[in-house]
Amino acid sequence: MNPSTTSTRTRLSTETRQAEIVDTVLNLSDSVGPGAITTVDIARNLGLTQGAVFKHFPTKDAIWLAVIGWVESHLLSALDAVAAAAPTPLAGLQAVFMKHARFVAKHPGVPRLIFNELQKPKDTPVKRRARGMQESYRKLLMRLLTEAEKHGEVAAGLDREGAATLFIGALQGLMFQAMLAGSTAKMEAEARRVFALYLNAVRESS
Amino acid sequence: MNPSTTSTRTRLSTETRQAEIVDTVLNLSDSVGPGAITTVDIARNLGLTQGAVFKHFPTKDAIWLAVIGWVESHLLSALDAVAAAAPTPLAGLQAVFMKHARFVAKHPGVPRLIFNELQKPKDTPVKRRARGMQESYRKLLMRLLTEAEKHGEVAAGLDREGAATLFIGALQGLMFQAMLAGSTAKMEAEARRVFALYLNAVRESS
DNA sequence: CTGGTAAGTAATTGAACACTTACTATACGA
DNA sequence: TCGTATAGTAAGTGTTCAATTACTTACCAG
């Protein structure tokens, strides 16, 4: 990762260090667990002393905020992209579902991070941003579902709000089960099966 | 909660104290958050000193284990009961779904506790028990789904494993969203809508 | 009534941790 | 080439917390 092959002497700009810290925290989030990450851990992984971390972030909380920012920009833009590239709204839904599953499988630190936030009763800034993300996500889904209904791809009179809740919920459930199993290895395969069932749910009206 | 109206002098048996501690921890799990609960918190809520807690549990981890034990026995037996009381397998599925949603809404400390566990990468004893619970849960669902298929209540050739995954996943997603929203108030209503969609998924075959 | 078991207290211990401070030294623009 | 802004170090500081220890006292069986 950070090869000491080159005698890369320290002294990097705050911007690059911040990016390194965010990256390191995402990795540690998977290997150590977000609740157990210490500033010593972060520093050691970067080959710095603990105090140096605070040259780039004023508090530990500020680091978490930067990390959720990274997730927000990377995940949402990826989902928007695959939705836009899909030939039909329903294909878009499938693409989003699978992309989301693959993103989480590739970055297991992300669900860990979120679970750690949700475990707190307080409405932390990180939680607020996560909620904002979910709202953007819902908007994307509602747009796709509405268009799908127009094109006759889903049942007329579908409970679209409920369908959006189930869509996101199914993915969150897959995360949950992956974390419980301790591995994201089977996640993509299970996502495929679950989405097939989801399609039945939205295509047929009660 | 623990009225000093009666001059209920201390000195209770370990069994009752253990039960009190488990109950207190479940409450604190919602109000303080599982990750932030300290033995001082527990003791203060029971009107004891911090050291007294360790007369009844050898370590803090032992307390968590007792709490997950409480959840396991209460939740699973309640689900078995409503499933058995239902007139048809499909009605059983609905009863289980709604009962589960109501249980979580009534005990918000429970999902918090689980999220806190899932945030850890290590395979803790608590996590193992939660996994055991999920396996029992899956068995119950598979039984209901198989019978439902026999009675023609669900599509022949249904992907039952996937349907079980989606069933549990949908509920876990509802927990997730409730924790993100900071309240379990709307959970039962959303569960109803989501289950209606779930029915479509399992009744129609692709 | 009485002796021992065990529930309780009060104080302490030692480790961990986020954050600070005083100082050093490197990169870089003028 | 020099001056300065700032990334980095090393050594704290104060706090929090789980667990322990030595001691006290309530309850119950014989």
Image: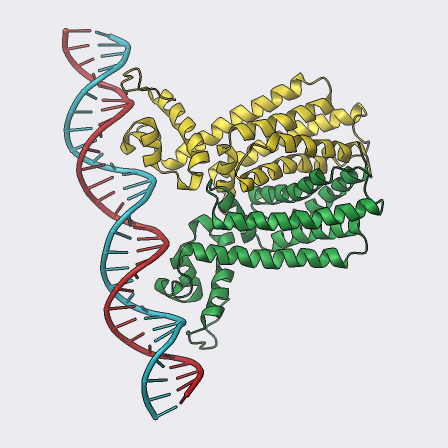
Chain colours: A yellow, B green, C cyan, D red
* Nearest to the observer: residue B70 or residue B151: B151
Q: Position of residue A96 (x, y in %)?
A: 64, 26
Residue A199 is at least partly visible in this image: yes
From what the image shows, is residue D20 above or below residue B179?
Answer: below
Identify the residue at horizontal 29%, vertical 33% (top origin): A50
Residue A119 is at least partly visible in this image: no
Q: Quadrant of residue C28?
A: top left
Quarter of the picture containing the N terminus of chain A is: top left
Q: Position of residue B193 (x, y in %)?
A: 73, 43
Quarter of the picture containing the C terminus of chain A is: top right
Q: Quadrant of residue A12?
A: top left
Identify the residue at horizontal 65%, vertical 49% (top origin): B137
Identify the residue at horizontal 69%, vertical 30% (top origin): A142
- Going by the picture, which residue comes out furthest to the right? B152
Q: Position of residue B12 (x, y in %)?
A: 44, 73
* Nearest to the observer: residue B26 or residue A63: B26
From what the image shows, is residue B36 above or below residue B10?
Answer: above
* Count of numbered labels shown in the rendering: 0
Q: Is residue D21 left or right of residue A28?
A: left
